[in-house]
Image (cartoon, rainbow, N blue to C red):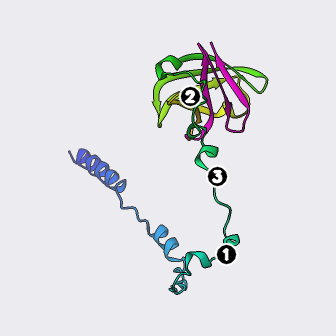
């Protein structure tokens, strides 16, 4: 009987030895050894009256940004010969001609940002970054994965679209 009590007692002591408290004091000591950050001076705030609008020299300012139409082909307006286009008619596989090369473009109705998901295979240049597209009036706008305009196209015939990339390269889609 004494032997079983001794074994039980030894087992309890071993179990309790595994439950000792761990201390993170070495980690706290390392952090407290770092010196505190020094305060930095704060410049004073000035106030004053602005000069009247006509009294400022315009040459001290950068050039005005380009117009919206120059930055976003979607804002430029459709050519008079552009045909009506619907988003549903664009879905599927298209053959792309751009910069003397040929590749494939796939357009879906799956939402991606403000447009629909799309992509290219075997393309070169700007079109390799295509990630989405949308229809804006009579125009199809191709966009990269960040929503930046890569190019725009207009329907010129049944199953044919012509336009250009943002850098001015001609691009056409056909089935």
Looking at marks 2 and 3 on the same chain, the residue that comes earlier in the sequence is marked by 3
Task: Name the foreground residue: 160 vs 2.
Answer: 160
The residue sitting at 54% across, 76% down in the picture is 34
For disc 1, the neighbor class at 10 Å (few under 14, some 14 to 19, many from 20) is few
Image-based side of 122 in relation to 153, left or right: right
- The image quadrant of residue 40 is bottom right
Task: Name the foreground residue: 18 vs 152.
Answer: 152
Q: Does 12 appear above or below 54?
A: above
Image coordinates of residue 110 in percent, x first then y, are 46, 26
Looking at marks 3 and 1 on the same chain, the residue that comes earlier in the sequence is marked by 1
Question: Which circle marks residue 66 in the picture?
Answer: 3
Helix, strand or loop for the magenta stretch, by majority: strand
Q: CA distance from mark 2 to mark 1?
A: 43 Å
Image coordinates of residue 22 in percent, x first then y, are 40, 61
Q: Secondary structure at mark 3?
A: loop
Locate the N terminus by quadrant: top left
Image coordinates of residue 124 in percent, x first then y, are 73, 29
The residue sitting at 61% across, 24% down in the picture is 81
- The residue that label 1 is drawn on is 57
Query: Does the magenta run of residues contain 38?
Result: no
Nearer to us of marks 2 and 3 is 3
Question: Which circle marks residue 140 in the picture?
Answer: 2
Image coordinates of residue 57 in percent, x first then y, are 67, 75
Locate the C terminus by quadrant: top right
Q: CA distance from mark 3 to mark 1?
A: 21 Å
The magenta-colored residue range is 147-175
């Amino acid at each position: 009987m004494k032997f079983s009590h001794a074994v039980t007692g030894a087992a309890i002591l071993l179990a309790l030895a595994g439950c000792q408290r761990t201390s993170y004091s070495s980690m706290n000591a390392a952090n407290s050894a770092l010196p505190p950050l020094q305060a930095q001076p704060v410049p004073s705030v000035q106030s004053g009256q602005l000069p009247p609008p006509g009294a400022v020299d315009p040459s001290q300012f950068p050039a005005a940004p380009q117009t919206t139409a120059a930055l976003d082909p979607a804002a430029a307006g459709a050519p008079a010969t552009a045909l009506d286009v619907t988003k549903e008619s664009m879905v599927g596989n298209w053959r792309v001609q751009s910069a003397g090369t040929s590749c494939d473009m796939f357009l879906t109705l799956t939402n991606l940002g403000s447009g629909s998901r799309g992509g290219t295979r075997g393309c070169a240049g700007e079109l390799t970054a295509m990630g989405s597209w949308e229809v804006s009036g009579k125009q199809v706008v191709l966009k990269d994965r960040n929503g930046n305009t890569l190019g725009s196209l207009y329907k010129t015939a049944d199953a044919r679209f012509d336009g250009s990339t943002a850098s001015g390269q001609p691009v056409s889609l056909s089935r």
